[in-house]
Amino acid sequence: MKTLKTISLLISCIMVFYSCNKPKKTTTVKSGIKISEVNLLTNCLQKNLQLDYHDAIQTGFTIPSNNQTDNGYFNFDFTIENQTDSVHEYFYKIYYQNESYKWPEANPGNKTKQHEFAHENFYGSWEDTNIGFKSCGKISANEKLKINDKFRIVGNPRNEEIYFYEGENDRWKRNPRVGEYSLMIVVVTNKDIETIPDFIKNINEQDQGQFVNPFYYFLHGQGKDIANCEINYYNKIINVSASPNLGNGVFINENIFVNKNVEEFKDLYDCNCNDSDNMYNKANIAQFIHYIDESSQIDNVPIIQDFFGGNFTKEEYNYLRTFYKKEDRIKILPQTASKACETIQSDSIENKIIIRNPASEYGKWEKQNVGMITRHGFTYGKYTVKANLTELLNSDNVWNGITNAIWLIYQGGRGTHLTNWNYRRPCKEKGYMKTYWGGGQDDRVERVAYSEIDFEILKTVPYCPSSKFPPVYNNYEANTNRVKDWNTKLPEDVLKDDANIAVCCTNWDMACWEPKNFAAGCHKVMHNGKTYLAHRWSDNYRAVTTKYMAPDDELFANDYYYFQIDWQPDKIIWRIGPEKDQLFEVGYIDQTISMIPNNQMLLIVTQEFHNTNWWPGSPYQQENIPFPEKDYVGEIYEITVE
């Protein structure tokens, strides 16, 4: 079987052999040393490689995996030629770095200094960081020596202790980044090996309390001036992407369920949704359970409606809004599932995830939030979701109260307080608000783990709301004695977007004041010829949002639609479109107005009942929207991270 596997790999790669083994190279020429006949991928793995999810929940991703090459490594070889007239001992080391999501190695204003965030870049060498430069032995004058070696890209490549737990290296806490990787081979003689500092030989070591990026050191810093040293840089050799298998099942973590009936909790377990060890290892998706804040409580009208199959109109909405007194209403919070697997399904035939907000029943009044969450985190990436989520507006353009959300959230995991390994970089200006829920008087701290990037798609007004809480337009008081006074039309500036929903694009920066243009209120942001209005309620408000109005029928009445969050170190771009090659930009926020997160995050897709007070100006209030008579169904067909 192993022989057949090797043959298969060779056949699959033969079409890309020359591109694999003839990379674009940048060389710094040094006296007496020549590197030649470089073959970086001699076991001929293709340049475009998809991450292998097998066992990644335990060990993190490795590039390549044991399923992708015969030995689970990239093999490489090269020749060193001694062009001097005397014998020398030579040493070599290989480094890799992610190029797609990185900071410049050198400070743009002063190339002799490392960029302040270059140490955050994802770079590594051999995974045993105790191995510095390897000796090639002695090479006689004008002789050559061929070197054969191997390497692979792993999580936590610097073996930082913060990602360890009880002596175990949790490499998944700093997974490899997606995108393109460059390689650098450095060869040095015994004359100058000692001039290379230990923190470059062994990348787990620091210089005065900070890591130094070896790509900075050798391409821009002191390393480029070492006399008897040759540096070969190969740009963008490997391109890595990720795509979780949506048909591989749903893992259930029962600890996240609240108020569950233990006897009935597992009633809906099946072979593709459970909490078994097998599902723990193979499932790429878990059931997501919302945190429900007490402030979400509403007094809902006790009505159940077939929202899309019936004929619920603006007039009926106005009637409920006007004539249902508070004492006749149902006091509820949005619910979450009390049984596992009840509102989520992994379809292993069509490789999709199905979520459903369940229909309500009289006496069992329920507006239940539902969703899925990925189980493997990344830092940065272009997250693209192909989905058919529930429609939001019916034939009279009345909102059903659902917010369709596609969002990223910081990852937790084992360790002290679960998240200390996943803090964002320090906020140097006043600090972050300490908690997500703490309000405007919350303490400020230097570092937090909380980060969130959102698509929230719902019915609200297109413009930035007033700084004064509601209303943002004249919210009429109904006269119950005359029909024309309670069945009042919405303002014209709201009706012009009657068939549209708001695609709200939000970055939760926890109110760090460090960005130079940080401000409360509504401010113009320009990008690619478009103007966005970025809104923040106050200086202590934890998020900034832009909006884009789009037809509900276009996004949610067709077979599918695409949603993309392009998260980069210095900016976030939101795109949507009918096909992946037809995406267009709908939101933009950069580091000049908002602190961009740099920690590891998971992807979530939800259909949820928000308290409309979160969106002042919305023409429909959640408490006046009936409970659903039928399920609201959403399907997720594909997730890619590139």
Image (cartoon, rainbow, N blue to C red):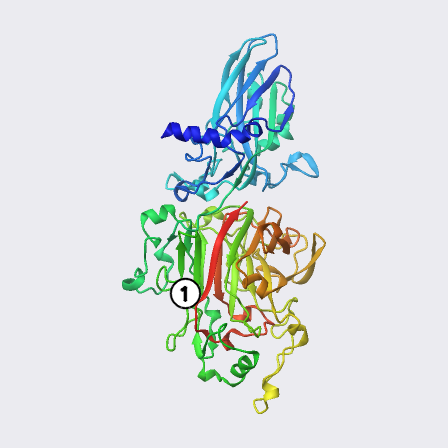
| Residue farthest along the right direction in this orientation | 529
Which of the two residues, 330 or 133, is positioned nearer the viewer here?
330
Q: Is residue 339 above or below residue 381?
A: below
Q: Is residue 186 above or below residue 619?
A: above
Q: Position of residue 459 (x, y in %)?
A: 57, 69
Q: Position of residue 246 (x, y in %)?
A: 44, 51
Q: Is residue 176 above or below residue 307?
A: above
Q: Is residue 187 above or below residue 243?
A: above
Crowding around mark 1 (Cα neighbors within 10 Å: few <14, some 14 to 19, many 20+) is many
Q: Residue at x 61, y 87 (%)?
A: 485
| Residue farthest along the bottom direction in this orientation | 481
Which of the two residues, 317 or 478, is positioned nearer the viewer here?
317
Q: Position of residue 3 (x, y in %)?
A: 38, 27
Can you say which quadrant of the picture contains the N terminus? Answer: top left
Residue 472 location, quadrant: bottom right
Element carrying mark 1: loop
Amino acid marked by disc 1? Thr
Location of mark 1 (residue)? 336
| Badge count | 1
Which of the two residues, 521 or 60, is positioned nearer the viewer here?
60
Residue 72 location, quadrant: top left
Q: Position of residue 370 (x, y in %)?
A: 44, 62
Can you say which quadrant of the picture contains the C terminus? Answer: top right
Is residue 267 something that shows in the picture? Answer: yes
| Residue farthest along the left direction in this orientation | 263
- Left or right for 104, reference 14: right
- Left or right for 411, reference 117: left
Is residue 199 something that shows in the picture? Answer: no
